[in-house]
Amino acid sequence: MAAHYEDRYWTSSDGLNLHYRNYPGPEGTAALPVLCLHGLTRNARDFGPLADDLCARRRVIVPEMRGRGLSDYAPDSNTYNPLVYVSDVEKLLAEQGITRFIAIGTSMGGLMTMLMAANQPGRIAAVVMNDIGPEVEAAGLERISSYVGQGRSYPTWVHAARGLQAIHGAAFPDYDLDQWLDMAKRTMVVTQNGRIGFDYDMAIAEPFAKPGNAAPPNLWLAFEALRDVPMLLVRGELSDLLSAETVRQMGARNPAMRTIAVPRVGHAPTLDEPEVRAAIHALLDGIA
């Protein structure tokens, strides 16, 4: 089957060639586009099934942050931080003439969504926040720090899948081999030496370990910019990054937020779960 997307590129302010998948959507559609923002170690493939689904009605744009996928690696690892990622994406939106959109953000992508809302309140028409909020739990950050940037590689896809299971098995206790293989193919590539490795610059671990880079401060203020914006908050029932108390506070601050908990899943749901997909469609059906 032919791909629904085109590979496109834009240039960051510091000269990096950055990649995004463009899913054009129906010809002549006036529907607001969807911007999908991936997590720390992920890439555009993370949203493949969801974008294939949503582009039946809307344009979908899935940028790959610097240091991931087909985007250039940064010569200065200090630029691997959410504020710079937001600046990169803002440049893409400006070039595309996009002034209002729907945002779907997984983990780090959700942090970026809040920062973008704070930059220009009112331009985000609806939001899907995937297992992330203004308060990020220290236990989850410590777990991520334990594996990010380690540069493991594997001789076969099955070895890669089992390697992911060893790292993330507690978050996905019911996954079978096929699901681990799917996760491996979303997050890894065949490298130049023929082994299978992660599809990101290992240097992203350096700034992640510095205070304020993994989760920027004062995000509750940024979240206030999304007050009354239609929002779906997806939380993995086993999440160690987003607490039930943070979910409660988010709902109190945004009465337009609906929450869905994915049972037997930690950080982060894939957004391909049937109940999540139905909830995303219900949210977007109310947006022109």
Image (spheres, helix red, strand yellow):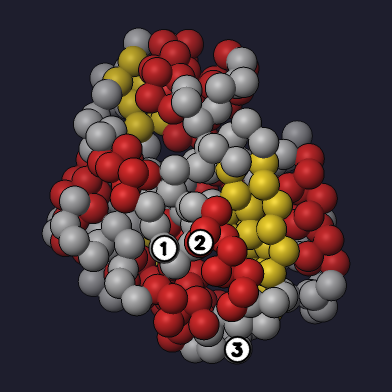
Depicted 192 relative to depicted 205: above or below: above
In the image, taking residue 108 as reference, residue 121 lies left or right, namely right
Give the mark, 2 or 3, whose residue is nearer the N terminus: 3
Q: Which mark is residue 122?
A: 3
Looking at the picture, tell me which residue is in the foreground, 75 or 209.
209
Depicted 89 relative to depicted 108: above or below: below
The residue under the point 50% across, 31% down is 171
Residue at image mark 1: 135
Q: Are marks 2 and 1 in contact (CB under 8 Å)?
A: yes
In the image, taking residue 63 as reference, residue 274 lies left or right, namely right
Other residues around mark 2 within 10 Å, as few (<14) / some (14–19) / many (≥20)? some
Q: In the picture, residue 24 is in which quadrant?
A: bottom right
> In terms of secondary structure, where does tag 3 sit?
loop
Residue at image mark 2: 246
Q: Are marks 2 and 3 in contact (CB under 8 Å)?
A: no
Query: Looking at numbered disc 1 in the image, what kind of residue is underneath it?
Result: Glu
Q: Which mark is nearer the camera, 2 or 3?
A: 2
What is the count of numbered marks? 3
Give the mark, 1 or 3, whose residue is nearer the N terminus: 3
